[in-house]
Amino acid sequence: MTHVRIFNHYINGHYLLLGMIEYLVLVLSFYLGTHLRFWYEWSADESLLLGSAMLTKANLFAVVMMLCMIAMGVYPSRFKEGLSGMALRTMVSFFLLGFVALSSFFYMVPDSPLSAGRGVLVLSALIAFALTMMVRIAYFRTIGASLLSRKVLVVGAGHQAAKLVKELADEHNKGFNLESFVRLEGAETVIPADKVIDMPVSLKNYVHDQHIEEIVVAADERRRSDLAGVGFPLDQLLDCKLSGIPVMDVIAFLEREAGKIEPRSISPGWFVYSDGFYHSGLRDFLQRGFDLFFSGLLIAVAWPLMLMAFIAIKLEDGLKAPIFYSQERVGLNGKVFKVHKFRSMRTDAEKFGAVWAQENDPRVTKVGKFIRNVRIDELPQIFNVFSGDMSFVGPRPERPQFVEKLKQNIPFFDERHRVKPGITGWAQLCYPYGASDEDSEQKLKYDLYYVKNRSLLLDLVIIIQTVEVVLIGKGVR
């Protein structure tokens, strides 16, 4: 089990299994926390433990805590920061986000049958933290240690293989090892010699002997007419495939493992024959309802921050200073619209024309730096969502001046305009703020993944994980 595809989005199967186990642990933790808090009442009336209201409360506790862990990127942090980083993020999830969210809910609806006291929440969170860390240590030492590092054999040692290595270099949540690269006869070798092997006499036997779990084809030329002079092992790959050994091409492997699609490795035919890129009237209707619901929810939660931003900008730049900044952007099917933001730069920031925002940009005001760090400057885009020019989730809209240039330099750049732009998006989560043509090409890889695989589930995942971006200021400029 490597990845499970749910509504077109790839989810690490081992983490999905771990998450299911931890959900049960969270439910159990709430029961234990409540029992410790009211042990004297339960000893007199054990029916309190078995009631449906108790089960509902426990599941509410588990759902909220799970969402908070997803929002804080707890599971991928295992690769980036180890168990200590995972533990720290879990503490923030339970004792900050989860506790605040549940306490706020119980405060707003104190008479609800779902209400629980702060003492119960604290005890349940403490127990949950202890039990989940014990479960994780046991999981990674027994099941996860081997399953999260499966062996992958790459057929090809040329430019495509080198590009694969480069694309995966910054991916911290790798659940695999690129064991070795098979040199193809008549093809150029770019991969370092210590990682390259000659084609085995029997590829199937080699895979079994070395305990290889998957084969990735990364040959520079794969068309039948181009393989005449290249020792491409088509028959051997077919033998492996029919023997139950997974075989996939480099494009699909990158899509699954890194959540991105390399635009310079695909062709128009790939768009035609690959799955995904689905559109339907029902989906558009549901998407519109999704956008309106989450935009309304965000306004209800964030209006005090918007008011404070309004006052702070006026105090810094004077009563006559403009609060909002409107700018032309390219949206669905290339339609140009005006996006609205809180002004975070000086009023003369673009007196010499449009330029990319840079790190530590001197044009940014003091108030602007703060509202950028916590993404408050993006909140007026909610009204673009209400007007229908944007969705809550989608590719970041770019300026027309930049789009025309990028379309000429980057293949398939215009395909990101097949969906509405968004306030947040897959590329914003996976890649820092784009401030150059090179950054735009990197972000396009994630945008293409989103356009191909978008669903309400993926949108919900993106919204939840945006919490981490806001809290730590990832990708701010």
Image: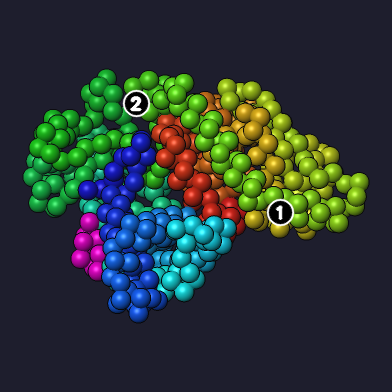
Magenta stretch bounds:
138-147
| Circle number at residue 226 | none
Question: Would you call the spot at circle 2 few (<14 residues within 10 Å), some (14-19), or many (20 or more)?
Answer: few
> In the figure, 358 relative to 350: above or below?
below
Instruction: Name the dominant secondary structure of the magenta segment.
Output: helix
Residue name at image x 49 percent, y 57 percent: 112
Question: Would you call the spot at circle 1 few (<14 residues within 10 Å), some (14-19), or many (20 or more)?
Answer: few
| Circle number at residue 274 | 2
Q: Circle 1 sits in a helix, a strand or a loop, which is it?
A: helix
> In the figure, 13 relative to 134: above or below?
above
Q: Position of residue 177 (x, y in %)?
A: 28, 54
Whether residue 56 sits left or right of residue 211 in the image: it is right
Q: How is the image coloured?
A: rainbow
Q: Kindly indicate whether the residue at mark 2 contacts the one at mark 1 (C-beta within 8 angstroms).
A: no
Q: Position of residue 313 (x, y in %)?
A: 81, 52
Residue name at image x 85 percent, y 52 percent: 314
Residue wearing tag 1: 304
Q: Is residue 145 highlighted in magenta?
A: yes
Q: Position of residue 227 (x, y in %)?
A: 25, 26
